[in-house]
Image: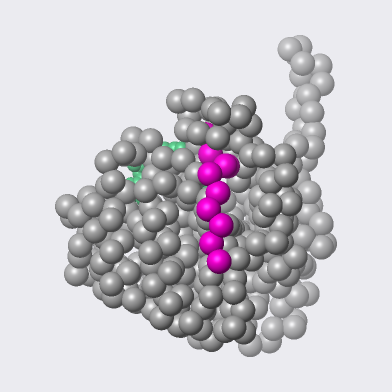
Amino acid sequence: MENKTYRIAVIPGDGIGKEVMPEGLRAVQAAADKFGIGLELTHIDWASCDYWQAHGKMMPDDWKAQLQGMDAIFFGAVGWPATVPDHVSLWGSLLKFRREFDQYINLRPVRLFEGVPCPLAGRKAGDIDFFVVRENTEGEYTNLGGRIFEGTEREIVIQESVFSRHGTERVLKFAFELAQSRPRKKLTVATKSNGIAVSMPWWDERADEIGRSYPEVAADKQHIDILSARFVLQPDRFDVVVASNLFGDILSDLGPACTGTIGLAPSANLDPERRFPSLFEPVHGSAPDIYGQNIANPVAMIWSGALMLDFLTHGQGAGRQAHDAIVAAIETVLREGPRTRDLGGQADTTEMGKAVAALI
Ligand code: NAI
Ligand code: MG
């Protein structure tokens, strides 16, 4: 496996995506060199608002063919609302990748690090360490439905959700597998079967059915309302949390928010079957308010790179070692500095990125 050269499409995108990407690459390259992982990087300037300004579209027409043979996409952030409306920039790039490459898992680690002030009182490093697994292709996010009798007293609006057996079982299986691979082997299934009386009881049944194949995993179901409260009140309860598209969208912002700055949170958009390239990106956007000063926190980008190396080698061998080395370097820098301003320090993006890479 170590002899393979992985092909990576590097897409910085817009705003601070362009400032944190060099630091993401610095860490990924350092770890790849150290553990003997071959990488072939292809630098891409489209999927950005600069490209849109020059060409009137976000991407070339043959974007899919250009990316199809890649093993992964390393992505910064897209969006520059001053020149391109967000629905145009996001639907014209990132959302096309997620859909057309069937990246049906959105995976977000949630961890509290030493040296990072926690917005929850009385929590220390180690107390919060879990994953949110979000279904990324169907569920509540559809364009099915419509309006009739518009503008009259009889106006009616219907918005449909779509839960397929195929789509539901594959995300549940992924979550059970992930829980099975972790020491605590706990899975929390987000539901709302008391209120959403058709799809959610069925979702619960699917979880019971899939769970029969994972007797070692302790699975429990929690309604989304109390589950959200527990993210704040008892975050130490969680190990792996799986949720539908809407619930997962909310939980995957709430989780990282409970552990400090958005500048730390990474994410992976995965096609676990590897028919298409998976995409690794920070949770944050292009941050126009701080772009141009080189003060963005590069950790979310760097940690996303660690997730990428781990995924490329199936969570084993050199890629897992590279991942662990990057995360250990992040831990040390967060504890001892240098730190960017969002963490109360004075360092710039490059200084913090170089410090992480030096430790790898
Ligand atoms: P944002 O995440 O870009 O910024 C929110 C706030 O967090 C800002 O005050 C920003 O300065 C701060 N921040 C973000 N990343 C940081 C970092 N690494 N270090 C320090 N501070 C950081 O979200 P916002 O402002 O709502 O969106 C800006 C643009 O980004 C929009 O065009 C939006 O559509 C796009 N966006 C793109 C995403 C993506 O590419 N996946 C995700 C979220 C937003
Ligand atoms: Mg979101």
- Towards the viewer: 232 or 77: 77
Image position, residue 266 (x, y; %): 46, 60
Q: Is residue 295 visible?
A: yes
Q: Is residue 45 magenta?
A: yes
Q: Is residue 50 above or below residue 317?
A: above
Quarter of the image for residue 209 reads bottom right
Residue 175: x and y, percent?
A: 64, 71
Quarter, ligand 1:
top left
Which residue: 19% across, 69% down? Answer: 336
Q: Which residues lie in the magenta part? A: 40-49
Decide if residue 318 is on the left or right side of residue 167: left
In percent of the image, x 65 and y 78: which residue is there?
A: 177
Q: Please give left or right for residue 333 compared with residue 195 in the image.
A: left
Name the residue nearer the viewer: 41 or 156: 41
Q: How far across and down, in percent of the image, does residue 225 sit?
A: 54, 53
Quadrant location of the N terminus in the rendered image: bottom right
Hey, which quadrant is residue 52 in on the image? top right
Q: Residue at x 61, y 79 (%)?
A: 4
Residue 130 colored in magenta in the image: no
Quarter of the picture containing the C terminus is bottom left
* Residue 282 placement (x, y as % from top left): 46, 55
Q: How many marks?
A: 0
